[in-house]
Amino acid sequence: MLMVLTAVLCLFRFISGACIFSFLTVVIHRLPKGERLVYGRSHCPGCGRKLGPRELIPCISYLVQGGKCLGCKMKISRQYFLTECLGGIAFILCSAGFGSAESGFLSLRGWIAFLYMGILTVVALIDWNTKIIYDRFHIFIILLGIASIGLFPEHTLTDRLLGAIVISAPMLVLALLIDGAFGGGDIKLMAASGWLLGWRAMIPAIFIGILTGGIYCIWMLARGKMTRKDRFAFGPFLAIGLAAACIYGDQMLKWYLSVWQI
């Protein structure tokens, strides 16, 4: 019985996160085009047909429709489906990592983490599509950091200020010395995130970001789809590291230090 209740609770959390992130797909695809985010019903980008209720069910609609528009049969980007699934997973992880109310909903600490995950998702996918990170998202992260001061007393003001510069400052120096080393959006993303997460989380975050970005570059070079002179969006890989560090940053840093002590 307990296992059944746990499964139902996880399903409820997944659906909640998927529904919220479903709206973020609108932000990801409309913001770069200058379209309104709130007004205007969802529509097919190919034929412009307004989508019906059965086409707007997070995750399910994509699978039932075979990843195609019911009208013009145009292939729907997998980013919609993956973003919604990511929202469900993020909700579950934030619930487990920061505790939740008995109803299965998120605690205030969990909401801060979940909202941050949402911002990272939007930043990563817009950067992947356009190679642009909008400053408004850095501001949102800074505001989350201010809102979280009382909720995360383990992150002192000194810890946050160090977090804002411990990675972003070296990135800025490298960007000034080496043309194209890092983009301004990447540097500001790390500075704002350091203010929210504190300096300890930033160490594993940049490590994971560089590691995943490096693996991607090697893979693309091996396939002949990138040359050494090509530039790519680094924001998505930083977002992966920051998301992991948001939930498991302290544990990862403690593990890393314990390994070197041995």
Image: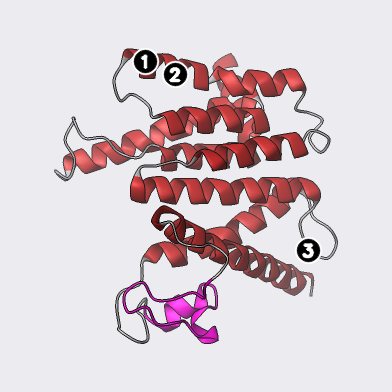
Q: Which residues are magenta?
A: 40-66
Residue with the mark numbered 2: 172
Give the amino acid type for the residue marked by disc 1 in the picture: Leu
64 part of magenta stretch: yes
Q: Is residue 6 left or right of residue 178?
A: right
Q: Position of residue 2 (x, y in %)?
A: 79, 70
Q: Secondary structure at mark 1?
A: helix
Q: Position of residue 100 (x, y in %)?
A: 79, 55
Residue at x 30% of width, y 83% of height? 73
Q: Nearer the viewer, residue 120 or 208?
A: 120
Camera-side mark, 2 or 3: 2
Is residue 262 visible to us here?
no
Mark 1, other Cα within 10 Å: few <14 / some 14–19 / many ≥20: few
Is residue 200 visible to us here?
yes
Label pair 1/2, CB-CB below 8 angstroms: yes
Main SS of the magenta part reads loop
- Image quarter of residue 156: top right
Residue with the mark numbered 1: 176
Q: Is residue 156 left or right of residue 184?
A: right
For marks 3 and 1, give the CA distance: 48 Å
Mark 2, other Cα within 10 Å: few <14 / some 14–19 / many ≥20: some
